[in-house]
Image: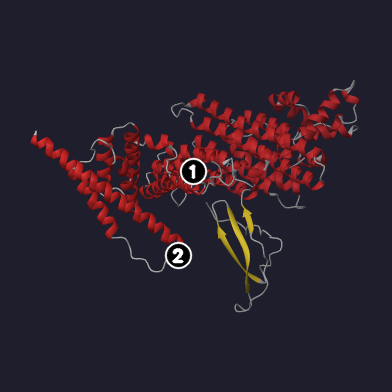
Amino acid sequence: MEELDGEPAVTVIPGVNSKKNQMCFDWGPGEMLVCETSFSKKEKSEMVPSCPFIYIIRKDVDVYSQILRKLFNESHGIFLGLQRIDEELTGKSRKSQLVRVSKNYRSVIRACMEEMHQVAIAAKDPASGRQFSSQVSILSAMELIWNLCEILFIEVAPAGHLLLHLLDWVRLHVCEVDSLSADVLGSENPSNHDSFWNLPGNTQTLTELELKWQHWHEECERYLQDSTFATNPHLESLLKIMLGDEAALLEQKELLSNWYHFLVTRLLYSNPTVKPIDLHYYAQSSLDLFLGGESSPEPLDNILLAAFEFDIHQVIKECSIALSNWWFVAHLTDLLDHCKLLQSHNLYFGSNMREFLLLEYASGLFAHPSLWQLGVDYFDYCPKLGRVSLELHIERIPLNTEQKALKVLRICEQRQMTEQVRSICKILAMKAVRNNRLGSALSWSIRAKDAAFATLVSDRFLRDYCERGCFSDLDLIDNLGPAMMLSDRLTFLGKYREFHRMYGEKRFADAASLLLSLMTSGIAPRSFWMTLLTDALPLLEQKQVIFSAEQTYELMQCLEDLTSRRPVRGESDIQQLQDEDIETTKVEMLRLALARNLARAIIREGSLEGS
């Protein structure tokens, strides 16, 4: 796209003096943070007082309007339906579907406009009323532009039918004509009504005039030349109007709401079978005649003029500058692209105009706490940069609740966004740990396939077991399955829980073998060895010999390794001394139990060999 014709509008931030102090800012995907620094612009070394606030500047504030949210939600469904239109459809069937989609978009705009109008009327605050009225004007302009684009670019009305469509366009958007016609035609004697001579005609009469225009034109010229109605100024003025006399039409300027109303009226009486290619000449001259040099064209005038010139790209550019959000240009461009009208216009940075505008619109939706879900579908239908943009934006969604996190997670999983799935699971696991919900934390870490975090959570489980003497979230630990292989610590946690289950089922031999293998294989953390050896005490004291002599030697070796590597402490407080006494007592009990068990195991194994 071309560069902007003028400088962008300046946004004034209340309380911030950008002329005096240096500013600092940080860009975000949908907003910008701005604040003053403590440095003066004139002398950088001088420290001056600054504004204490940080301001958030959003580029798409319309997404926060309650009424416009309906526009975004309703149009989202229409957009998805348009993407699913069968590409194999051609000719009239495809064209009729595209026209129907266009009318659906316009009906949504009009519904929002009518609701906004009612809100503006009911507003108690004058400032709010003005704000809503301004929004009504914007929506009205949007429908006006869209309707004209529908006539010129989508329906592609041929000569003859073109004027009929333009007449309907003016009637729809210039309410004064219809209300005036209703007043006149509803009276007992329309010809005697005060406003009868101010009417340019109703639709049916205009249609008949278009069909018989050539005959009436000759008749009018003859009557005017013969001064047939010289005694009646109204009839003579009417003759001049029917001949398309520009001066006569401009005399009735107060009855014409705007220059495009003047354009259609002028075409009706001067060239009712106008060809599309000639529209730009009549549009430009009508604008110049109607304004008469008294005022310059408004942005809306420039947009409509570009449409009459069949310059689609200029229409999109002007709308992008004039309108306050990307909704209009994104959806109109998408529709025109489906009409195969934008195929040749590619941008320099890897995307065409349609995709660029859809990306901008979807980015704005992601700034809203709930509309971001709509933005996902728009990114999906941007083939080049949509997925990358979605990945960047979805990582910035605040996961305030687990329900919202699950929505985001489902979206990522459906699109095989592996890194984002892992990132979300890690975030949820961290939140669960902070809230001491270890079961949930372990579940999310397993889902994220994060071995380091699974190890951390497993350590918390083991620490809680040491403090409380029992496990929490038994169902989760009992059903880890292959997931326990994610990390050694998680494997140990699962196997240690399995040891307790075997012990509870009185499968003492299996429990003893598992306990010993946990220590000798190196899976068990050394800090947990004393707990494991303590768990072995009841098995060592059983009437039946559980540990063999060889197994008992291995347990003794583990105990000696543990006690020999115990760090030498300096001066200790009372609590530490008490803990050391408890540890010493445990070691003595274990040594005594291991010695007794060894003696019993040797006698038992010797008697078995002798027999």
Picture quarter with the C terminus: top left
Give the tally of numbered discs.
Answer: 2
Mark 2 highlights which residue?
Answer: 573
CB of mark 2 within 8 Å of CB of mark 1?
Answer: no
* Circle 2: element type: loop
| Residue 145, quarter of picture | top right
Residue depicted at x 14% and y 39%: 605
Q: Nearer the viewer, residue 511 or 289?
A: 511
Q: Who comes first in sequence, dot 2 or dot 1?
A: 1
Mark 1 highlights which residue?
Answer: 437
Type of the residue with mark 2: Asp
* Circle 1: element type: loop
Q: Nearer the viewer, residue 408 or 116?
A: 408
Q: Nearer the viewer, residue 53 or 169?
A: 53
In the rendered image, the residue lying farthest to the top is 188
Type of the residue with mark 1: Arg
Q: Circle 1: is it few (<14), some (14-19), or many (20+) Cα within 10 Å?
A: some
Residue depicted at x 71% and y 48%: 288
